[in-house]
Each structure stands twice: as C-alpha cells, then as structure tokens.
Amino acid sequence: MEWEIVIGLEIHAQLATKSKIFSGASTAYGAAPNTQACAVDLGMPGVLPVLNKEAVRMAAKFGLAVGSRVSNRSVFARKNYFYPDLPKGYQISQFELPVVEGGRLEIQVEGEEARVIGITRAHLEEDAGKSLHEDFHGSTGVDLNRAGTPLLEIVSEPDIRSAKEAVAYMKKIHSLVQYLEICDGNMQEGSFRCDANVSIRPMGQEKLGTRSEIKNLNSFRFVERAINFEVERQIDVIEGGGAVVQETRLYDSDKDETRSMRSKEEAFDYRYFPDPDLLPIEIDEAYIEAVRGTLPELPDEKKARFISELGLAEYEAGVLTASRELADYFEAAAKIAGEDAKRTANWVMGDLLGALNKEGKEIADSPVSAELLGGMLQRINDSTISGKIAKQVFECMWNGEGGADSVIEAKGLKQVTDSGAIEKIIDEIIASNPGQVEQYRSGKDKLFGFFVGQVMKATQGKANPAQVNELLKQKLA
Amino acid sequence: MHTKTISQLSAALRSGEVSSVELTTLFLERIKQHNPALNCFISVTEAQAFAAAAAADLRLKAGNAAPLTGVPIAHKDIFCTEGVKTTCASKMLDNFIAPYESTCTAKFRDAGAVMLGKTNMDEFAMGSSNETSYYGAVKNPWDQARVPGGSSGGSVSAVAARLAPAATGTDTGGSIRQPAALCGLTGLKPTYGRVSRYGMVAFASSLDQAGPITYSAEDAALMMNVMAGFDERDSTSVERDVPDYSANLDNGIEGLKIGLPKEYFGEGLDDGVARVIDAAVKEYEALGAVVKEISLPNTALAVPTYYVVAPAECSTNLSRFDGVRFGHRCDDPQDLFDLYTRSRGEGFGAEVKRRIMIGTYVLSAGYYDAYYLKAQKIRRLISEDFRAAFEEVDVIMGPTAPSTAFKLGEKADDPVTMYLSDIYTIAVNMAGLPAASIPAGFADGLPVGLQVIGNYFDESHLLNVAHKYQQATDWHLQVPKEFQ
C-alpha cells in the first residue's frame, strides 16, 4: 500500500527578551544554576506574575510576518501538572484565546514545487526549568534559571507531507524569527526546538491516522531522522496488522529511534483554566499597526529583490537570504564591489562559506568582513587583479594580513596590463618553445592552454588573462 | 490605654502622652497574659516590635511621623514578612520564612506601624471558624467556648480582646466580615483590586482581598489610607487614585438610600440576629436614611458557585507546595511520586485537602463546562444582581452572618453547614464589591454584625455610612468583660 505522511510541528522559540515573561530576572544563558531565578520564578508563596510586554510585541511581530491575525484580546491560562522543574505546579500558557491565530508560510524543498503550510496559532507561555540527572547520585537536581523564559509556541496545521518538508518548514521559521530579531535561534542552547506530530494514512484517504507526538527535537537533523524513523515504525505496525496508538514518544539520537514516553491513557489532564492572576492581553489596531511598521524586509521579499534588482538566480537568492546575517553580509559586500552582484554572490557562497565551514565559524565571526571582501571584489572589477590572484588575496585577508589593497601592494600582486610587457614575454615563450608552436599551428588547439600557462607562470599569475588570450592568439596565428 | 482606638493612640503618640515603646510593651504584656487562652497569635515578634517602636519614637520626635507611626498592629499570618515565619496556619509552611515582604505589610512597616506578631487563622484561609488551623482553634473573647469566626479568627480575637488595637485580615468569602461580626468589630473588605495581593499567600486569586479589622470605621479609614493603592507587582490591582478615606467620614447621610435584600432576611436567619439588624436599620432611618426592599435573585446560588470557583483556584494555587523548594517535605522520600504524595498528604489538613480535591474535580476534562464554566456564568449573574440594585440604592444592608458565634466543634464535622455561615458575605466577593461589617448590638450576649455593601471603589462612602452610625451608637466600643 502507498502511505501518505501527515506531519504537524509545534515549534518552541525562546523570545529574546532581556527579562523573563513574568518576572524581572535575567534570561541570559549559562549562569550558575538557580542564580537567575527570583521569588516569582521559584513559585514562592504569595508572589505574582507580571507580564513582560516585550514578549507580546515579539509575538505580534511574528504574527504579522506570517500573515496571522493578532488577537485584540488573548488570555493566559494555567496548564496544571506536577514536575520538579515546574515550580508553581502549573505552567502559564495560553489555551482558548492565543495571541496569534491563523497564518501561512511558503516552503520549498530543493527540486520540488513550493508548498504553503498553514499556521494554526502561536501562543505565549513560560518555559520550565531543567532537571539535572547527572552529578546527583540517586536524586535529581533542578536548575530554575530557564523557568519563566518566554516562549512562543508556533503550531502548524497538519500540512507537512515529508520529513524533508518538516525540515524546510522548521528552517524557514528559524530564519524568520531571527530576521524578526525575536529569537536568537540557538538550537544547542535550546532556544529553538520542536515537537512533531506524525501520522500516516493510505494515499487518498481523507481521515487522519492516529498520531504520535515526538517531543523535544532540537536539531534539523534529528527532526528529519526522528520523523523518518517514526513513519517507518508506523508503517510496520499497520502493515503487521497492528494499530498505531496515540502516545508521546521520545527520540533517542544515539540509537536513532523513537520510544514511547506515555500513552493517551497516561496522558495528563492539564485542567486548563484562565489564570486569575493575569488580566487578558488587550491589543488595539494602533498597536498592531505600530508593530507592523517595525517589520524588517522578510526573507521572501528579500529573495525576490535579489533576483529582480541584482540579477541573481533563484537558487543563489535562496541561499543568500536563508539567514539575515548572510543576506546583510552579501548586500554590504555587493554594494562596495559595485558592479557584478553575481560575482559577489559566487564569492560569498563559494570561497567565504567554504572557509567558514572549514573552520566551523559563523558569518558573524568571519575574519574577512563584508567591507574587506567588497574591497577585494572592487579590485577584480577594476582589473587590478585577476580572479585567480584574488584567491590568494582572499587567503591573505583571511589570515589577517590586511585589506586587499595592502595585500596586493605588499605581495606585488598587481595585474600586469602593460601589453608591451606581456608581448615581450610571449615572444620569449614562442622563441623558446618552437616544437609546441609548430604543433599548435598544425592544428593541435589544445596547446593554447600550455602557452597561457607559460605566460602566467612567467608573470607569476599577474598578467591580465583576457589580454594574454588576445595577444597569444595574434602571435600564434 | 489598651481599649483606645488607633485614632486615639495616634493622637496620644503625637502629643507625647505615651511612647510607642510603652504601647508596644503594654500590648506585648497583654498578649503574654491572654494568648495562651485565646490562641490568637502564631508568632509574637517581640524583638522586631521593640526595634520598630524605638524607630517610631525617633520619627515621632523628629516630627515626620505618619498617622500610624508607632501604633502597634497585628498581621494575619497569610502575609509574607521578610525574616519572620509565615505559616498560613499550615503544617506545610511551619518552617517557612519568606525572603520578601508583602506589599501590604511593607506599607504598614513604611508608615511606621509596629508589628506585634502574626495571627492565627484557618489553614490557608479555608474555614469560617478558625478551627482548621494547624496551630489549634482560636477562642472568641466574648465566650471562650465559642469560635471567633474565620478565617481571620486570630486577628479578630486579638483585637476584640484588646491584645492589639487593630489588625489586618483577608477576605475571600467573608473571612474579614464574618469574624468581625462574631467578635463585635469593624471589618472592611475593599473592592477587589484596591489592595495589593503581592506577598499574600493566595487562596482563591480572583476573590482574595486584604482589609482592616478595627474598632471603628474611623480606624478602618486610617488603615485603608495605608493599605490601598495600585501595585505594579500585582496585575489585578487597579490603577486608580486613592482617596483620603478619613476625609468624608462626617458627611451627612440624610437621604441615603438603603436597600434591604429580601433574600437576606429569609429562612436560616437567627431571630436574635434579625432583631438586631432591624434595630440598626431603624437607627439609620432615624439618621435620615431611606429604606427600600430590594431583591438579589441569585443569592441562593452564591454559596454553591463559590464552592466551585474558590476550590478550583485554590487547587492550582496550592500546587506549588510540593515539598521540592520550601515548606514541609516528608522524611526519606522513595521517589518523586512518594515525595509529592506524602509531603502534601502530611502537610495539608483535612479542609484544605477537601477543597483541593473539589477544585481538581471541577477543572477536570469532562467536568469543566458543567462546573467551572457554569459557575463563572452564575458569577456574572450575581454581579448583575448587584449592578441592578445599585441603580436603585446607595448601599445594601443586611446581617453579616446568619447567627452569632457558634460553639467550638459545633459545625466542625459538617462542612456544608459551616459553608452556610458565609451565605451573606460570599456574593460580595463573587462580584468584587466592597463591604463592611459593623457592630450593631448583641443577641444573647454575643455580638451581631451589620453588613454594609457598597458599589465598586465606594469604600470612602461605606466608611462614612458606618462612621455616622458609630457616632450615634457605642456597640463598636464594647469590650468583653475579661478584657476591659
């Protein structure tokens, strides 16, 4: 039988507020355990939550960026369950009336048609603390630094049809929240993670199959692998005559498998009800419009502009707009370079990203800034150096030897464009290689490369390649 | 000196007739003498009291004293006080010392009032007789075989016995007004949102409100001048100017329109109480007020609705008491489940457990709509009753409680009968309105309270209405024989 895969993602994005969603404690990552948890975060008796309005602004910004309705009135609810890293015994979340409702996002898997994924809602909630099972023999430690960190939970419609689409969707949201500057996107630190609801159904059937929910996936690779494993598992269960049970599963990346955490029968009854300690969030149209005014150029808009204004290909524009930092870097370099944005794109996507990857560096830590790269490209464009010499210049800049001009100066890499000088060298080469000249003239065209190489060797690569080609053709004719 | 109102004490302190240290000594002595019998204090903070009194005397000398500077008061043990044990009368918090101060007590501290100690109460404010306290029942100074009412039983007992000239209380369903009535005191529950709840251990967040327990309305006004106001740490506190509650006390009440809800005078009301209330209303007529019968048709639904809403909120408010970070933890927990169940099982008393279970039930999947949601709808109907009534009248009056103080143990095994002792007070919390109970006389030697309900944020007017009555009567100045 042919199966259709149905996936919905619940993405948790930590909002990049300075303080927590309901207290004044800092949200900075990595402090000593429990040093960033105040009485409110600790759930002490009598203390009360006070909403951080910045979290609401960020949620609204996200909603507007995906074409959602930002609710004029939304309500915080208590989600009740006991766990040591949940200090109050309930999580303040939103249930019936979330701050953002509806929305859509276009995604594209390489080599496939673009598809639109519906966004059901996005709601604000507080993160829990962390239970630490290592280092505590026979017991568990609790670190509440993360407790109360604002989260935006972004819930998709079950519109995703493959693990690859799930990754594309997650990457797009990941990029978007960073464009919007509402989340740092740091997946290692848990700032961006997701739960995946996965089910299968016979191709063509409308009724959804029973789903399982895979919790806490914190890398794109794990999302893809966990979904693929889970789909295979469900197919095996059904084709083996069994039935998929509704349950929560955990992905074990070491074993590359998912396993059951709790079934529907064991599922918590969260007893949601409106939190009486917090007033509903009231947002008027003026506020929404003010937030709309702060939206940056979004990835899709940027991509379209790179294609239409800068003449980039669809693929190039897609790669360069995947993150705001990369897009900003590219644009800054292209602006300095002047003409030929495509050349800048090639350098950014090729040499720059290659070098960064090789050293495991982020664009923000690149030793070659956009200004340096742009400056070098300017020298290619004005024929001071050739593209080949530029590789050498780039390497020097990467190693901190200064800007393109000083590297060219110091190493004497300036391109030779004096045709007299080049002619002289060509004459010498023709004179000292009579055999090759004869072979070439009798039809062995391939030898042309040999002569170019010789000239370049003699000029240490500094001769203008176009000039060399032209002069050689004349002289060898 | 120990029977003086805080208005009188404030004047005596300013004139130099007495010092704060002297007053503090006097009341601490009285507490030593009488608390063993009455059991109205959980903690007596002698050292802190003397330090605060000495500081207050300096302030009085320096001439920058506030009206309550140097005045000793007691706080219900539901307010977190930095460095002083806050138990909420529960074994769960027997060892709990908060590292922060509630807004309410901080305001009194900053005003220079001297905290004598922290008063006994029903456990987590759940009760109407002060019999659910982990620290034992509190006695009514008018008859020590009887309850003082609850949940602010320790505060009223202490003030009635003149162990403290005033105290704070909290009122979720009548916990200031009912005990004030049963002990012959003036108690005010302000409009919801008027006094900050920050640092007040939550019972039912949408109903809890702190207020003063005093001899007179004049004293209640002095207390309200300190307590009331917006607090950015409590999102449900209201950003609204605080009037000078003392300013309008003497305004005339000629033409005051008093509504008497017929539902408050029906079955279940003790005859002796009814007679006292009738007489009080006549007194108001003599002062120029006009009386009108009104109806609050959903009155009968108030108690059952309350016992859905309040337990629902308390069931989750009390989830934080899990033995993990503070409070009681069972010995030698075997695993997480054992830690939770034994810590909570040992730490909470029977009434608290009952309400947590009711609350958990009414919020559960499949029951939520039938109980919690329906209760919220009825709550709106109850508010609507009052809204309509206040289009016709200025204040609503009736008995605060259906009977005078009952015997210790009399209703302890019958929760429903106990719950009905708040039948006249609960609707006020459901609607979020302000209401006072003022002493209106005696039935069989026991105090009877008259409840005066006002419109939202109308505390100033309520106190004026109460004050005029207290100018004409002296019920509020009666002292139980043993404590005169």
Image (cartoon, coloured by chain):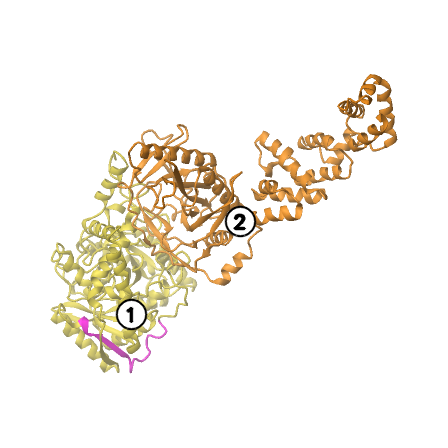
Chain colours: A orange, B yellow
Q: Tell me: B351 left or right of A167.
A: left
- Magenta residues span B246-264
* Circle 2 residues within 10 Å: few <14, some 14–19, many ≥20: many
The Cα atoms of the two marked residues, 1 and 2, are separated by: 45 Å
Quadrant, the N terminus of chain B: bottom left
- Specify the quadrant of the image occupied by residue A372: top right
Q: Does residue A258 lie above or below B360 as drawn?
A: above
- Which one is closest to the eye, mark 1 or mark 2? 2
Residue B430: x and y, percent? 27, 63
- The residue type indicated by label 2 comes to Leu
Closest to the observer: B362 or B161? B362
Rendering coords of residue B287 (x, y %) = 25, 81
Q: Tell me whether the residue at label 1 lies in contact with that at label 2, contact meaning CB atoms closer than 8 angstroms.
A: no
Up-down: is B273 above or below B129? below
- Disc assigned to residue A333: none
Residue, disc 2? A180
Q: Secondary structure at mark 1?
A: helix
- Residue located at (46% from left, 57% from top): A70
Q: Which residue type carries mark 1? A: Glu
Identify the chain of the residue marked 2, using the numbered disc in the image: A
